[in-house]
Amino acid sequence: ATPAEEKDLVIIGGGVAGYVAAIKAGQEGLKVACIEKRGSLGGTCLNVGCIPSKSLLNNSHLYHTILHDSKSRGIDVGDVKLNLAGMMKAKETSVSGLTKGIEFLFKKNNVEYIKGTGSFADEHTVAVNLVDGGETSVRGKNIIIATGSEATPFPGLTIDEKKVITSTGAIALTEVPKKMVVIGGGIIGLEMGSVWSRLGAEVTVVEFLGQIGGPGMDAEISKATQKILTKQGMKFKLNTKVLSGDTSSAEVALQVEAAKGGKAETLNADVVLVAIGRRPYTAGLGFENIGLEVDNRGRLVIDQEYRTKIPHIRVIGDCTFGPMLAHKAEEEAVAVIEYITKSHGHVNYNAIPSVMYTHPEVAWVGQNEAELKEAGVKYKSGSFPFSANSRAKTNQDSDGLVKFLADAETDRILGVHIVGPNAGEMIAEGTLALEYGASTEDVGRTSHAHPTLAEAFKEAAMATYGKAIHY
Ligand code: FAD
Ligand code: NAI
């Protein structure tokens, strides 16, 4: 065999973590190769995650608005019909445009793209099974593992991506189910549940805990969100656990009971979406050849500079610690290259925003009330409802609120929590404020254009250190 080519950096995985690190490395002048096995770049996020789900969320929202909400806006529409195949095509067009865009960026930044499955032959050599057949190998002075995550399966329910689906099936259904049951009321359950609910499915979300939204969502915001989604037609069964499922008939029959024990009941559904979290994916990487191990939750253990116990092998993104978010992966990707080239990098894990792209959106950054209470921090809070914001009212889109949590003594912002129209864009302002150590008074004394939704943000800040004007 010919000796493997030596690179400054080899990256396994071409998802958000891997491809961003590859581009950044190219920009820094490193000789870099990125190995990706799925045949297209962008990972979960671009291919089966963030992007396709947002396409369906946006277009199902438009459909739902046109269908149910035109009259009050003075728009008479004719026969409104769903063209599901067309909606899926629009989704595929956005996905393929963006994934091809990354291939272009690879070329522009001199990144070698190797299409195949990588696994460690030794500490510096990655063997690659090529997608188009055959094998190769590549040596790296540095190696980054960025192999991402996969859906956590539900014990006893076999995923066929048709009747029992993960998010991957949920972005590709060919007809609208009559009844859908979602196991897990976290971000995926609520985003994909609301897509199919808007398109006409009767959606019931079964959640083990007493609140929806998954980890991190503030309890008050979660309650408000549940109320809004219920008004939109979604049903919720909280404090409920799924015991087992029977897929032998046309409908799936799920046995559920109260989480703390109680009477069992059966829920029937055409389609069951399993959305109980994701777990790191590191299968087949050949760790046995280099002595790397994962922790009890499947995560690769790293230090502050993303190094494993083999210092030139580093890990970023979903397959290690921290929230499984694309923008978190992206921050780490830039930082890890800075560690490799300059020995210093920076990610502020206290200021990573979370956004749930339902309508209205839910967004937050920093700590929530329960976390502050648990940490014994004395805090104050202030909020402002969108029902008192002129733009939201004019847009007939005024469900929700903005809420600030700030240090009781210094007024420094500790958390911002929003449910409301455009919350996902608005949280950028909260994140910047948190990053720069702003007080709520700093925000409240900053001019915000009128009439904008962002005025609700300013007025919630004013309500925290003083009083809002319009409420
Ligand atoms: P991944 O994107 O999973 O990429 C890892 C890549 O490595 C994959 O393409 C895989 O094929 C490849 N790979 C694995 N093993 C090998 C190997 N041995 N050799 C070669 N290649 C390999 N996050 C957000 O921030 N916003 C959102 O709106 C959002 N929406 C989401 C919606 C859904 C339905 C899902 C499932 C996730 C969503 N996420 C969202 C999460 C986001 O997708 C992930 O946080 C992000 O993709 C993590 O990037 P990553 O590069 O670490 O992993
Ligand atoms: P999640 O962690 O957000 O939510 C899972 C929910 O399922 C939790 O509320 C949990 O209590 C519940 N649950 C767990 N086991 C259960 C059981 N046996 N029965 C009933 N409920 C159970 O996970 P989810 O929604 O699967 O998403 C995975 C990850 O993907 C997210 O954590 C996020 O990192 C990422 N993602 C991000 C998006 C975004 O940023 N907009 C969109 C979609 C996914």
Image (tube, rainbow, N blue to C red):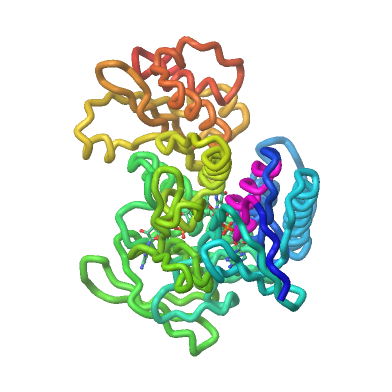
Q: Considering depth in this image, is 349 or 271 the residue closer to the camera?
A: 349
Q: Position of residue 379 (x, y in %)?
A: 26, 26
Task: Judge whether 471 appears above or below 147 on screen.
Answer: above
Residue 9 colored magenta? yes
What range of the chain is rendered magenta? 8-26
Which of the two residues, 31 or 365, is positioned nearer the viewer here?
31
Quadrant in the picture for residue 147: bottom right
Q: Is residue 179 visible?
A: no
Left or right position of 394 against 110: left
Tally of numbered tags: 0
Is 172 above or below relative to 22?
below
Q: Position of 361 compared to 261: left or right?
A: right
Q: Quadrant of ligand 2?
A: bottom left
Residue at x 57%, y 52% (from the top left corner): 142
Residue 402, position as x, y percentages in the image? 44, 30
* Vertical order, 215 against 445 (above or below): below
Give above or below for 420 relative to 459.
below
Q: Quadrant of the C terminus?
A: top left
Quarter where residue 243 is shown: bottom left
Residue pictured at 44% horizontal, 59% vertical: 235
The answer to whether residue 29 is magenta is no
> Which of these two is toward me, 234 or 447?
447
Let me know if residue 125 appears in the view.
Answer: yes
Please provide percent x and percent y for residue 87: 74, 58
Residue positioned most to the bottom:
248
Quarter of the picture containing the N terminus is: bottom right
> What residue is shown at x 68% (from left), y 55% (from top)?
33
Q: Residue 85 location, x and y as percent? A: 76, 65
Q: Residue at image x 41%, y 52%? A: 302
